Image (cartoon, rainbow, N blue to C red):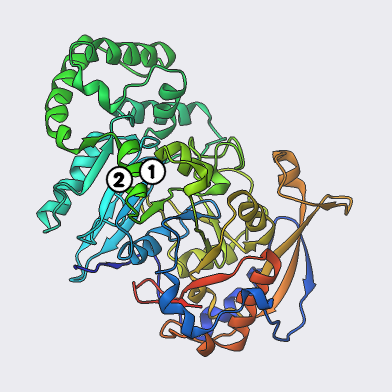
Amino acid sequence: MNISSVKLNHASPVTGPKWAAQFRPFFHHHRNSDVVSFESRARAAPSSLAVTANESPNRIELLSQVSGVLGCQWGDEGKGKLVDILAEHFDIVARCQGGANAGHTIYNAEGKKFALHLVPSGILNEDTVCVIGNGVVVHLPGLFNEIDDLEANGVSCKGRILVSDRAHLLFDFHQEVDGLREAELVKSFIGTTRRGIGPAYSSKVIRSGIRVSDLRHMDTFPQKLDFLLSNAAARFPGFKYTPHMLREEVEKYKRIAERLEPFVVDTVHFINESIAQKRKILVEGGQATMLDIDFGTYPFVTSSSPSAGGICTGLGIAPRVVGDLIGVVKAYTTRVGSGPFPTEILGQGGDHLRLAGQEFGTTTGRPRRCGWLDIVALKYCCQINGFSSLNLTKLDVLSELPEIQLGVAYKRVDGTPIKSFPADLVLLEQLKVEYEVLPGWQSDISSIRNYSDLPKAARQFVERIEELVGVPINYIGVGPGRDALIFK
């Protein structure tokens, strides 16, 4: 088996006292905050969360037949790395929602780089079948660009990538419309990747979308595409639609349909038959719960359901068959674009964290906003998804900080506690965050592979998160490399 390695956009820990010294004056520049001290003593995690190092080798093998990896924040948590590591132990890796707005940079054993946006991250494990489920919106030219790149670099995709016949198509015009829509919003940018995801889901929801199965009926395809293009031209004056454009698109998709046919299957049947045959399935979530169309900071969200419910609707499987779900969360928080961000660090402190963690989008290259870990939002995500464990990523990025803060509670401006993550955007912008301050460890942890070898302050940080959230942290990322993972 050709085991792959992963490298996310993530810098090695910065060493030396200069960088650390710069953080102290900048990292107290929050939106609204109350900072409380946290006693500098080791807090033991609850006994139910404690795990010995000897259990680690068996943990992956003991994951449920149908397991999932989902994001706990506003995306970009490092889900691809964990999916690639776990994929070796699963027969199938499946995408259930989103589209090419997901972005993972993956490296194989020889150090060859692959940029994946639609192809599931298990593709470099040669025994893994990759499924693009019915809940995904698929830009076929982009998908074939990825497949061509994989094939050109020795990764066989034949018979290993299955595309749902129920998946909706994302066309080039959806991408153009995405940009026109953002331009209309002026100062209130949603912060989309401009990959056409929202417009494609809009076509789906208003029941005028075109599905993969429609490509088998080229006698009616032109009329359906004409309807979509005409609506776009009527809605956006900047979108210029001509009969020539329609003819070109139809001819292009005739060629694409012929090439696509070997990949197309009834994935609902395939997945459920695989479950009956006891094959192991790993679901790869895109984006994250705080971008969920229902549960996220609406309207600054994505257009699909990246939370646990999206697994069932995006693959056509029953809730009772879904087992272990692993939530992926950074040791701090980032988000892209506009929208509420209670624990955001403004000014130079945020800039320094962005540079240390190389917080720039894989798909867009956009700089990410940075802040402290938001425990209120994390607990909210854990409630919605029922995570059995967490993967805490980029712990090494905090290595040189003299102190680290956790946003542990929200309060109204009058001091009244807020019990959960609120839907009200005005309240989210006005609320005050109560922080706990923990000591930093100020040492390089990137070469550590055993939990017990982490500095005491680092273990205290991990265990305090477990205590506050009530979910065990079983995986800890301490660097960008595939091997830079601690099994706790």
Left or right: 300 in relation to 65: right
- Position of residue 77 relative to residue 74, above or below, is below
Residue 392, percent across and down?
Answer: 52, 68
Residue under the point 12% across and 52% down: 151
Q: Which mark is residue 67?
A: none
User: Which residue bears the numbered disc 2?
Assistant: 131
**Residue 470 lies in what quarter of the image?**
bottom right
Residue under the point 57% across and 47% down: 290
Mark 2: few/some/many CA within 10 Å (<14, 14-19, 20+):
many
Residue 338, percent across and down?
Answer: 56, 43
- Position of residue 88 relative to residue 447, above or below, is above
Residue under the point 63% across and 51% down: 341
Cα–Cα span, label 2 and label 1: 17 Å
Residue 21, percent across and down?
Answer: 59, 81
Left or right: 165 in relation to 43: left
What kind of element bears circle 2?
strand
- Position of residue 93 relative to residue 183, above or below, is below
Name the residue type under label 1.
Answer: Asn
Q: Is residue 423 visible?
A: yes
Closer to the chain start, of discs 2 and 1, is 1
Q: Nearer the viewer, residue 275 or 124?
A: 275
Q: Is residue 337 visible?
A: no
User: Which residue bears the numbered disc 1?
Assistant: 101
What kind of element bears circle 1?
loop
Left or right: 212 in relation to 380: left
Name the residue type under label 2.
Answer: Val
